Amino acid sequence: MGAFSDYLEDAILDLTINQVAYVPDSSDVYVALHISSPMDDDSGVEVTGGAYARVLGAFTAASGGTVSNSLDVSFPPATAPWGTVTHFAIYDDATGGNLLYWAQLTTPKIVSDTDVVTFKASNLIISLN
């Protein structure tokens, strides 16, 4: 399961009800890690420091109200502890940008120095069901 951000909810409503075009900031999407829930308003805490950076994501075509990552998503090795990662999020930019979707991890991950966080293909799932 995943959640839409407030930003994306407004964009979809304007597109479908008011015929206001939705133009994403970028043609790419980026996967981010959070140590607290991003919440729909993007008020959560994203990982920072220790060589952390969002990673370019590739996702399947939507089917049955669900998409998942089509390739492995691997973050750079941590050069300092990142804390306990509890959520992932999808943004429309590598830095800043707009939160699009977010979801809680099935199992939180404590990221220590030198750890590499990898999500195998099909493990990051956003579902509207």
Image: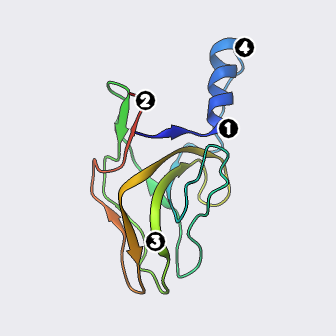
Q: Which SS class for mark 3?
A: strand
Q: In the displayed structure, would residue 86 be above or below residue 76?
A: above
Q: Looking at the picture, how far across and down is residue 99, in whole percent?
A: 61, 47
Q: Amino acid at mark 3?
A: Thr
- Mark 3 or mark 2, which has the lower sequence index? 3
Q: Residue, x 27% and y 57% (percent of image)?
A: 120
Nearer the observer, 27 or 99: 99
Question: Left or right: where does residue 99 sit relative to residue 57?
Answer: right
- Mark 4 or mark 3, which has the lower sequence index? 4
Q: Looking at the picture, how far across and down is residue 126, in whole percent?
A: 41, 40
Nearer the observer, 29 or 5: 5
- Name the quarter where the C terminus is drawn: top left
Q: Amino acid at mark 2?
A: Leu
**Is there a contact, CB below 8 Å, between mark 2 and mark 4?**
no
Question: Which numbered tag is attached to residue 7?
Answer: 1
Q: Residue, x 40% and y 48% (percent of image)?
A: 58
Which residue matches tag 4? 18
Which residue matches tag 3? 84
Question: Left or right: where does residue 20 sit relative to residue 83?
Answer: right
Q: Amino acid at mark 4?
A: Asn
